[in-house]
Image (tube, coloured by chain):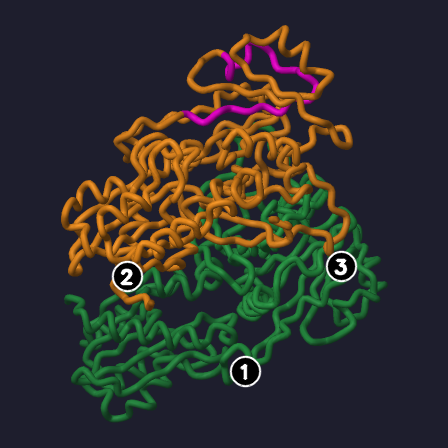
Chain colours: A green, B orange
Amino acid sequence: MSISVNDGVFMAEALQLAARGLYTTEPNPRVGCVIVRDNEVVGRGFHTFAGGPHAEIEALQEAGERAKGATVYVTLEPCAHHGKTPPCVEALIRAKVARVVAAMVDPNPLVGGKGLARLEAAGIAADSGLMAAEAAALNPGFISRMTRQRPWVRVKLAASLDGRTAMASGESQWITGEAARADVHRLRARSSAILTGIGTVLEDDPQLTVRLSSQDLGVDANVPQPIRIVLDRQGQLSANACLLSDEISPVWVATSQAAEAPLRQRLPTHIRIQALPEREGHLDLAALWTWLAEEQINEVMVESGPKLTGALLEGGWIDECMIYLAPCFMGADARGLFDLSIGLMSERRPVQINDIRRVGTDWRLRCSFPSNQNV
Amino acid sequence: MSISVNDGVFMAEALQLAARGLYTTEPNPRVGCVIVRDNEVVGRGFHTFAGGPHAEIEALQEAGERAKGATVYVTLEPCAHHGKTPPCVEALIRAKVARVVAAMVDPNPLVGGKGLARLEAAGIAADSGLMAAEAAALNPGFISRMTRQRPWVRVKLAASLDGRTAMASGESQWITGEAARADVHRLRARSSAILTGIGTVLEDDPQLTVRLSSQDLGVDANVPQPIRIVLDRQGQLSANACLLSDEISPVWVATSQAAEAPLRQRLPTHIRIQALPEREGHLDLAALWTWLAEEQINEVMVESGPKLTGALLEGGWIDECMIYLAPCFMGADARGLFDLSIGLMSERRPVQINDIRRVGTDWRLRCSFPSNQNV
């Protein structure tokens, strides 16, 4: 079966619908659906929150009888299995749609392709792959978890044009302007978790919550706060930390086996404490990701100092790096972006800049690392 | 007299013509001229090199008899005085043009306005100010020399995304890619002089010449090499420096009075040595600029290490900063952009980014400093 120009138009609308779930679907993927009969859209839907209806079901409900003989555009292969809700493929078969176009198959290797196969077995034409890259970009965390058993790791950095993140004293508020800081809160809001190091907690005592309302974010649904995770190998976290002063979202502490018991004694019982293996004197980051993927954490946003960001860069763990460059110079004594020691030009880390744009008075660079082995 | 839409169209062409002299007119300004009769361009000209015909004369020659009753668009007020060539206003009066539109008046306060006044006295309508900012942008150095008695100072920097210019060892070749390096050679070619510090000469032993041909630069005329100037307070320059190994362009050495005589003994006689006063243990930069302006240096390009760039930033002497950001990280041990010590966030230097664009694999930021007192 061939793909037409109209197919692209309708899939683009399905992608836009999917994006409306950006802040609310986790741990589920963001999915949008458009149902078209005689070149007219008769049903639209998107997944809003886990446990709520899938995009296809919403769209089928709007379409009603008109779904019969229609084409269904959906940004992710319809599910064939019973999860929190009944399988979407059965609903599509019951509605007697003629054709289903999925932007991408389910990235879960255990179920990928099964939904489309079930549709075809029921006599419904089924295509996939239309605007697959755009669909994948909606769900980097979900896909990473399904295919790599680890979350998508996004590091946020704010620096002066001469690459400095704080004065020698630690003073850093505020390098970037209001618009950049609001942008950071949007990134937090789309993340399942915010990861930081104990050094940042001890020095800056941050709250690490989303301080934008649903209205600010342009969504109707309630936006869940990301889980806040502190890497604290030696168990230095104080019960007085600002992070623990509210119950806006859970706080998880990853620590060493040696420090686990003392932390449990010291911290309130609602704080989750997880012991991780150590490796070369640090918490084992591979074990961290495995744990977080098991906990259905899709996108992790790292907001920390140069020690943790340096270790993440060194380990090849950074999937995406958002650098906010502020139009100022902070001088030679100020702190750098990464605690990373490189001696030779040939060892410098290549960066791929995927996007560069102005955010208020600052510039935002979205980068990745071509040398990472992302498997 | 009013300015019409057509006036803008023809002045834009005159500006484009003027830019063709970018690499060759110094110490003269870049000037273009278009002569229009009955909405038809009958003459075009631009100034190519000092001593050669002015733009107006070239355009009048092409127009011939058709200049009579025509409108003349010129990017800089026509000269009323005898320089290396006879005054252009007299030629315009003889050609019986009807109207002259100048983008800007002559920035030299001694002659500014005199050309237009002389034309009006001869019954020729004379306007100025059309696209004045664009015209001024063609000649930052000439204007600076006329109005501030100092050259336009452009600092070139090449750094990694984390703001590093060299490894701790000094290794720095090459941070940026080929396209950025060619762009640097274009900046050199438009400069009257390249300024560096003795530290850079001792460490990198650079040649600091333009290694692009006239053809590469897209011009017919011979492109003069910029003068190479070394700041060498203590007289450490060796006769074996790569700079001195060719006679591609003059080398000037600015030094202290104490080091002048030993340098004269040591260096070849064709090297110009200039003693400058000292100030707080450094060569007095104000005296440097005065000297260079007297020597008709319009645009100075600084290519040096963090010591000189830091002193220039500190002194508020940088008019324009071209930062080439390479897509890599070089780590915390690598060297920074400026030897500049700032202790508090409130003391950080604000930078205005006037342009940001991709140059090959790198990004170029054209910056200025709103806090400089540029008078």
| Residue pointed to by mark 1 | A215
| Residue pointed to by mark 2 | B7
Q: Mark 1 or mark 2: which is in front?
A: 2
Q: Nearer the viewer, residue A16 or A316?
A: A16
Q: In the rendered image of this protein, does residue A19 appear above or below residue A174?
A: below
Q: Which amino acid type is marked by label 3? A: Asp
Q: Mark 3 or mark 2: which is in front?
A: 2
Span shown in magenta: B225-244
Q: Which amino acid type is marked by label 2? A: Asp
Q: At 37% across and 51% down in the image, what residue appears? A: B118
Q: At 48% across and 55% down in the image, what residue appears? A: A366
**In the rendered structure, the residue with mark 3 lies on which chain?**
A
Q: In the rendered image of this protein, does residue B266 appear above or below residue B320?
A: above
Callouts 1 and 2 close, C-beta under 8 Å = no
Q: Which amino acid type is marked by label 1? A: Gln
| Residue pointed to by mark 3 | A204
**In the rendered structure, the residue with mark 2 lies on which chain?**
B
* Residue B353 visible to an observer of this rendering: yes
